[in-house]
Amino acid sequence: MIQVRPQFDPNDPKYHTCCGCHVMTGAKIAASFNTAGIIFIPILIIVVLGVHDELRGNGSVLAQYLGGLLIPILVLGCLWYGLIKEREGFLIPMLAFLIIVLIQLGVAVFFLLIWTLSMMYESSKNSIFTIVVAALVICCSLFILECWFFVVIKNAYYYIKHKRWLSTGGIIYVQQLQQGYIAVQKENPEP
């Protein structure tokens, strides 16, 4: 066997996103969008609680919503740490979280689509129909965006993994065909 050290090429096309940027840049863009969402949700909750008088005095509602953000904040912190320090293990929580989000969005799209089709069949064109169609469009857009986030972060995971593995001396053993010679006696030996 011969030991071969493969060369790591960070500019390999498999480490680029569909829009042409590097997967690490794309992963940081995805992390930035998720960070903006995590910042926007509490602001939205506080505004909604301020508008509704019946919820204004109820601090437990605010605590529930903000407490529900604890896991996404921790997952997002792991993602940022993994991207900055280039540690692939810290990207795994975000990948698992994105799978859960994709399943939830897929179920939401499925039920909204069924609801929209049933409303179209009944020919009811009221304000609820408009809201359902808007929710369907938003959920479909979010599903596509989250799929892109998942693919980019997965590719960033493999980029970091390959980069670290090959820079730490990962050696690949290549099996080579061994040729052997067999001596055969001639029928008429020379004197």
Image (tube, rainbow, N blue to C red):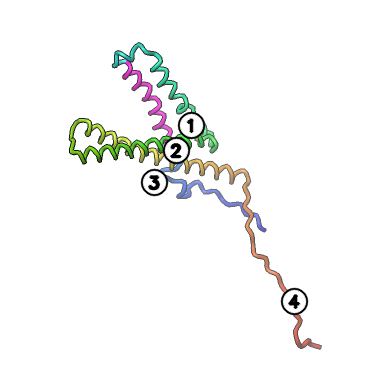
Check contact, mark 1 vs mark 4: CB within 8 A: no
Q: Which mark is residue 80?
A: 1
Q: CA distance from mark 1 to mark 4?
A: 65 Å
Mark 1 or 3, nearer chain start:
3
Q: Toward the viewer: 32 or 71? A: 71
Question: Secondary structure beneath disc 4?
Answer: loop
Residue marked by disc 2 = 99
Disc 1 crowd, CA 10 A, few/some/many (<14, 14-19, 20+): many
The stretch in magenta equals 28-49
Mark 3 or 4, nearer chain start:
3
Q: Which mark is residue 18?
A: 3
Disc 4 crowd, CA 10 A, few/some/many (<14, 14-19, 20+): few
Type of the residue with mark 4? Ala
Mark 3 or 2, nearer chain start:
3
Report the mark closest to the observer, 3 or 2: 2
Mark 1 or 4, nearer chain start:
1
Q: Toward the viewer: 144 or 152? A: 144
How many numbered dots are placed on residues in this image? Answer: 4
Which residue is at a point 44% across and 21% down the rendered structure image?
67
Q: Which mark is residue 100?
A: none
Type of the residue with mark 1? Trp
Residue 8 percent across, percent down from the top left: 54, 48
Magenta stretch contains residue 7:
no
Residue marked by disc 4 = 183
Q: Is residue 144 above or below residue 127?
A: below
Which residue is at a point 22% across and 31% down the rendered structure image?
128
Magenta stretch contains residue 34:
yes
Question: Secondary structure beneath disc 2?
Answer: helix
Q: CA distance from mark 1 to mark 3?
A: 22 Å
